[in-house]
Every structure is written in C-alpha cells, then in structure tokens.
Image (cartoon, grey):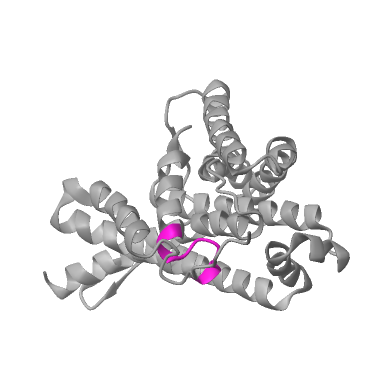
Amino acid sequence: MTFSLFLQNLINGLNQGAIYALIALGYTMVYGIIRMINFAHGDFIMIGAYTLFYTIPLMVNAGMPAWLSVFGAVAVCAAVGVLVETVAYRPVRKAGSMSALITAMAMSIFLENLAMVLFGARPHNVQKIFNLPSVKVWGVTLSMNVLLTIFIGVAIMAGLQIFVKKTRMGKAMRAVPQDPDASILAGINVNKVITITFAIGSGLAAVAALMYCSGYPRVTNDMGSMMGIKAFIAAVFGGIGVIPGAMLGGVLVGLIEIFVKLFAPGWYEAVTYTILIVILLVKPSGILGKNVGEKV
C-alpha cells in the first residue's frame, strides 16, 4: 500500500468514524442514564436527513447558506426524540428492560414505515450542503468537505464531554444513573434530565445526518437502521454508557470498515459484526467500560 492510498483511506475512515461516533453518543447517553438501548435512535438520522432534503432548497432560495438547514434538522430531531420518550418510553420505563427493548424496536419499525408512507420508498437526492475546494497534501487530493465534517464531529464530541463534566445539567445527568431516588431527594428533576438527554442525543443524530449527506447525498426511509446498528456496535466496542468510549468505538469501527473495504471489499460487514461478537466474549463492558456488579 502506498502512503497516498493509506492517507486517503485514513481520512475516509475518520470521516466514517466521526459519523458513527455521533450516533453512538446518542445510544450511550440514553443507556448511561436509564439503562435502555434506544434502537429507534438510528431512525432519527433518517428524520434529520429528510428535514435537510426539504429545508436546504428553502435556505438556498432565500439566499442563505445551505448549512443553516442543520439547525432546523436539529430542532425537528430533538422534538421527535422528546415526543418518542414521552409517549412511548416513559410509560414502560418501570416495566422492565424487555418491555423497553420491545418498545424501542417497535418504534423503529413505526418511524421507518411512517417515513415510507409520507415520503415514499424511492431514494431522494439531497442538495449539496458544503461546496468547498479540494486540497493536495503529500500528493493526495483531499476533499475539504470531508475534513470539515471530521472537524465538526470532533468539536461536537469535545463540547459534549465538557458539557457533561462541567455544567450543572451535565452533573445531574451523571447523578441520576448512580441513584435516581437520591437524585430526587437532592432536588433533581429526573424526568427533565431524561427528556433533555433524549433531546441532545436526537439532535446529535441530525448533525450525523448532515455529515452523512455531505458525503452521500441520498436519503431513504431505511437509511438509519443499518447506520444505527453500526453505531450500536461502536458504542458497545468503546464502552456503552461512557462518552469517550462512544467516540473511540465510532472512530475504530469507521477505520476498520474502510481498511477492510480496501483489502477485502466483500467482508467489511462480516468483520463489523464479528467485532461485536468478539468484544462481548472478551470484554463485554467495552474498551473503556468498567464491569459493575448488579445490586441485589
């Protein structure tokens, strides 16, 4: 492998990994607070992508930059995330993990079929979001669009980590999973914390949709299901419930996928799922996760 080919695939892998990491953050934030796997989270990417599809032409016709449409996508995804949590997840929160899991899977199927009814099963092409020139580095032509999406992903992940560690709401998010009852006694509104967590996680899915559509400008009703599964693998790989773990897992899964595609194009899907099996067998808590005994 030449150095130029390695560098090109490294950049592509980081771009793919940043998208997975942003989606994985949504999984890990929800799991970290209420110990629930929100399998409908991947479909929020689809909602964000459809929002971009319809709002980008409005922005362009109004003479504004196309990327401003991401704010509308974040707002829509956050609103849908809060609605799903309030209507579907909150009533089964105390019914057990199996009820919550089945509800999440049902919600995923519902959102995908609702999108097919509203927008059709035909793929829709999203207008170009960024129109930046390419640069040549060490003989490799790199798209500035890709470099920008990587930068956006890193900046958001770093900002989220600071938010969780330094702000009052972030501290409440860390306190609730430790002891919900004690959190209530300390004056923390647990329902409010959970709702805000869903809103943030769903908003991150909209940013992931922006990053995905900037490289692959096509949206379908089922686009979020496969990316959601890959991001879930990334979250488990890095340590679900741990924000740095979601970042690390997303980047590693993205890099592994791209480089496996380079050497064995037909095997990258199998390798991705093998990672999940291996990590569950060897270290179920993930790379940065910690084994915590159940209270009895």
242 magenta-colored: yes
* Image quarter (top left, top right, bottom left or bottom right) of the N terminus: bottom left
Residue, x 28% and y 61% (percent of image)? 256
Q: Is residue 150 visible?
A: yes
Q: Quadrant of residue 106?
A: top right
| Residue 265 locus on image (x, y percent) | 17, 49
| Residue 48 locus on image (x, y percent) | 57, 44
Q: Nearer the viewer, residue 99 or 168?
A: 99
Residue, x 46% and y 46% (percent of image)? 228
Q: Nearer the viewer, residue 102 or 73?
A: 102
Highlighted range, magenta: 236-244
Q: Please state if 209 lies on the left or on the right of 3 as rendered.
A: right
Q: Quadrant of residue 13?
A: bottom left
Q: Nearer the viewer, residue 260 or 286?
A: 286
Q: Please state if 163 lies on the left or on the right of 186 as rendered.
A: left
| Residue 193 locus on image (x, y percent) | 76, 58
Query: Above or below — where is 245 with respect to 33?
Result: below
Query: Above or below — where is 141 with respect to 220?
Result: below
Q: Please state if 293 lies on the left or on the right of 222 as rendered.
A: right
Q: Quadrant of residue 250?
A: bottom left
Residue, x 14% and y 57% (percent of image)? 263
| Residue 141 locus on image (x, y percent) | 26, 67
Residue, x 63% and y 59% (percent of image)? 296
Q: Is residue 133 visible?
A: no
Q: Please state if 55 lies on the left or on the right of 238 as rendered.
A: right
Q: Residue furthest left?
A: 1
Query: Above or below — where is 268 with respect to 289?
Result: above
68 magenta-colored: no
